[in-house]
Image: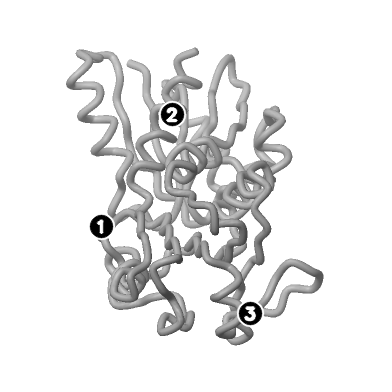
Amino acid sequence: MDLYGLIGYPLGHSFSKKYFAEKFKKENLADCAFELFPLENIKAFPTLINKERELRGLAVTIPHKESVIAYLTLLDDKAKEIGAVNCIKISNKHLFGYNTDAFGFEMSFVPLLQSNHTRALVLGSGGSSRAVQYVLKKLGIEFLVVSRKEIIGEGSITYAAIEKKTIESYKVIINCTPIGMFPNEEAYPQIPYQWLDNKNLLYDLVYTPAQTLFLKMGLKQGALIKNGYEMLTIQAEENWRIWRD
């Protein structure tokens, strides 16, 4: 039996388990299984690897996309540059780290871009944000990282520092935080939604609910919106390609 899984914490509502269970059934892969491995602390990772001898690949979600790197044998160039891993291939006791978040985001994001989408606000600074920043740099889109805390250095601001002129200048807003994700559906990033208009693009990496309050409030102002479901499906298939290659 080839075992695959997802590590992160918490894992109460996982896209991956349902997706791969359906995939294995549809493709008659009776020798494959997918399990959830909730790890509150990344220090439990080596124990998991030693215990589950049939593991062939792991997906990685918050909060371990950066901290898991210390336990890996090798990173591919993209994961190394991003500084975050969401896909691990396990072969002959070696752990190889990849970042497929960037690929999934780029493939689902680029078709939405319009001529005025030349600047972006990136909400959050974690592992998913790093992948998004990598893609924006690749596309030549200028961006600011928005954080709850003061970040030393250029290229970042706090939520409190977002003004009307910021929204008017940075037409793309990408939520890379778990704010608004099930079961905390009443939460939303604290940005001034009243200044959004039909030239804005709001992209939320959260996929459940399908429309977070972040997206609903943007839609109310006429903004183009998209959630992270397509990104996740593209990323999942890229994980599978890497695991089985």
Q: Which residue is mark 2?
A: 52
User: Mark 1 or mark 3, which is nearer the start of the sequence?
Assistant: 3
Q: Residues within 10 Å of mark 2 (few under 14, many from 20)?
A: few
Q: Which residue is mark 1?
A: 210
* Mark sitting on residue 158: 3
> Depth-wise, is mark 1 or mark 2 nearer the camera?
1
- Callout 3 amino acid: Thr
Q: Is residue 96 above or below residue 27?
A: below
- Callout 2 amino acid: Glu
Disc count in the image? 3
Q: Is residue 210 above or below residue 191?
A: above
Q: Residues within 10 Å of mark 3 (few under 14, many from 20)?
A: some
User: Mark 2 or mark 1, which is nearer the start of the sequence?
Assistant: 2
* Mark sitting on residue 25: none
Horizontal and vertical percent for residue 88?
54, 31
In terms of depth relative to the viewer, which is nearer, 51 or 45? 45
Q: Is residue 111 found left or right of 18 in the rendered image?
A: right
Tell me the SS state at disc 2. Answer: loop
> Depth-wise, is mark 3 or mark 2 nearer the camera?
3
Q: Are marks 3 and 1 in contact (CB under 8 Å)?
A: no
User: Mark 2 or mark 3, which is nearer the start of the sequence?
Assistant: 2
The quadrant the N terminus occupies is top left
In terms of depth relative to the viewer, which is nearer, 183 or 38? 183
